[in-house]
Each structure stands twice: as structure tokens, then as C-alpha cells.
Image (cartoon, rainbow, N blue to C red):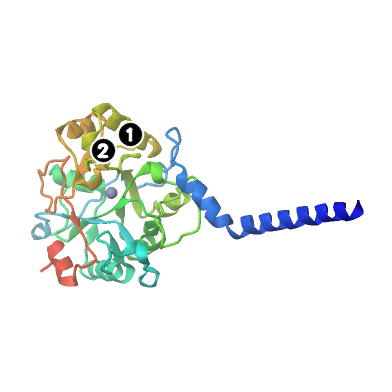
Amino acid sequence: MIKKNLFNICFTLVFFGLFSFIIFSYYEDIARALYNHDVFPTDETFEIEACQQWTNSTRNFDMAPDNKAENVTVLMYHRIIEDEEIDDIHLEEDGELVSTVLLKSQFEEQMQLLKKEGYTTLTLKELEQYINNDLDVPKKSLVLTFDDGFKDNAMEVAPILRKLDFNAVSFVITAAVHKYDYPFKAGEFQYFSVDDIHNSCDVFEFESHTYNFHKRMEDNTPYLTGKSDEKVKEDLENSLFNLDGKRQAFASPYGAYDEENIQLFKDLGFSMAFTVNPDVVYPGTPMYEIPRKEVFPDDTMEDFKEKIGLH
Ligand SMILES: [Zn+2]
């Protein structure tokens, strides 16, 4: 009898010991798996209103008449990964970087060039006024944009931009944002946590890249052009709610949009919308079809200079 009880106690202890050990060892992974399956609630906000200070204010650029920009380039990036952290997830089958991933060293070199050449990074409000012919901006003006809202933007990009006194735009898939913070692992697809947004809102202005419609239908049609107008409207309204009702800008996933979408952007009160059409922006450029030039990992510095119109 005593033996049997002892056996039971030992068995229970070993069982709980093992159980605790497993939970303890995999705590991070378990927690991350739980968070990753969550979507950000539609009835909560990132509470970013207070920290996006430049959204409505514009600078008065004091400059010589011959230094006025004839056009402005908007650049588009996705992920920036530390060179040593490059993993299988960032590579194509042939070993080349996937088109949305740039090495941090490459990105830093590009930003250093912009600084050295005296570039100004415009806010969206300044770009809007430039397009409306209400604001002159210097020749060497750019808008930097980052799509999807990857955590590496907060961890790697923000410190670089902050150091150089540059600002940028982050187009966020708001459903992908995590309510709770979690450790950064470059080798995974991780999106902003709310803390990441708060910690980098001195650098980024956060705008909509849909709530949860960064997806394609079975026949490959992007949700934005494939789903009903009501469904698209509902999705974009959710993203606007998450973003504290800010209605400055929208960027279409995959650059896909149609006439109905443009009408919807206007109806929802967005001031501007961006495409992935690689062109420059002029005063008078259609406000809901603003072109952007994507920067690719195989761009040389010469390609980059060409993209920004630096000769
Ligand atoms: Zn995207």
C-alpha cells in the first residue's frame, strides 16, 4: 500500500516536473504562437494620436527659387534585415534575397548617401501640399515608405532614421499588429506590436494598408479588387479605427485597385492613396494614384541614385 502511494507520488512529481520543464522551455514559442494567431481587435486602437506629431504640421522651406523641386520621388521598402541574421526565410530557392528584403548594410549606405547629399524627407502632409501646388519643397526631397509593418522596421530601421533625423511612413496591416510585445527574431515573419508602434512613432507616421485584406482570392485576385465593395469598406473602416481614425493615406496591397476603390478612399475621407507604379510625383499628380518606386535588394548604388534622380 505504502509502496503504491509512493509510486503514485513519484509519478505525479515526475509528470508535473516534465510538464513544467516543457512549458518553461517552450514558453516563448507557445506565447508567440498564441499571439501570432490573434488578429488585432476591431474595436481597439493603437492610441497613436498623441505621438504622430508631424501629421498635420508642415514646414516652410526657405530656399532659393532655383532650388525648387520639379518632382518628388516616393520610395517603397518592406523588410530590412541585419546582414548576419539572414535566414532561409529571406532567400529565394536560388539563394538570392527575396525582393522585399534588403540587407541592413545596404539600407544604411542608401540613407547615409541621402544625408550626405542633403536630402529632406517629407511628411505626407507636405507631399499632399506639394501635389496641390500649395507648398514648394527643395529639389532634394523624398518620401520614404515601408509597407506591411514588419517588426524589423521598429528594431532596425527606426534607429537609423532617428540618428539621421529622417522620418518615414509606415503602411500597416492593422490586424497583424500584436497587442502584447514579444522578442524580436529576424528569421521570422513578425509584425509590429503596439509597443513597437509607440516606440517608433517619433520616426514613422502610421497609415493604412488594410485591416486584414492583404490577401488574394483563390484565383489570385487581390481582395481589394475581388471582394464586394461593402466588405472592402468594412475592412478599411476597421483599419481606420485601429489607427485612431487618422485618414491621411492608404496604400493598396500589391498595388491593386480599381475605380470603385478610389471612390471608396474618397468616401472614407482618405486624403491620398499610393500605388506601386514606379514614377515620380508632380504638382497635379492624381491624389489617389500616387506612384512609388520600390527599392530592391539587387539595386546597386548607381541604380539607387537613378531612382532618386541623383546625377
Ligand atoms: Zn504590402
Circle 2 SS class: helix
- Quarter containing the C terminus: bottom left
Asked which quadrant contains residue 239, the reply is top left
What kind of residue is marked 2?
A: Tyr
Q: Separation of disc 1 and disc 2 at Cα? A: 10 Å
Q: Are the residues at dot 1 and dot 2 in contact (C-beta closer than 8 Å)?
A: yes
The residue at 36%/55% (across/down) is 203
Residue 214 visible in image = yes
Which is nearer the eye, 234 or 50? 234
> Label 1, on which residue?
235
Give the answer, above or below, for where 12 lies relative to 155: above
Which is nearer the eye, 65 or 120? 120
Looking at the image, tell me whether mark 1 or mark 2 is earlier in sequence order.
2
Residue 165 visible in image = no
Which is nearer the eye, 305 or 262? 262
x and y percent of residue 29 in the render? 53, 56
Q: Residue 223 carries which label?
A: 2
x and y percent of residue 265 in the render? 23, 34
The residue at 37%/42% (across/down) is 174
- Which residue ends up furthest to the right in the rendered image? 2
Asked which quadrant contains residue 107, the reply is bottom left
What kind of residue is marked 1?
A: Asp
Residue 247 relative to residue 133: left or right:
right
Label 1: how many residues lie within 10 Å, few (<14), some (14-19) or many (20+)? some
The residue at 62%/55% (across/down) is 23
The residue at 18%/46% (across/down) is 275
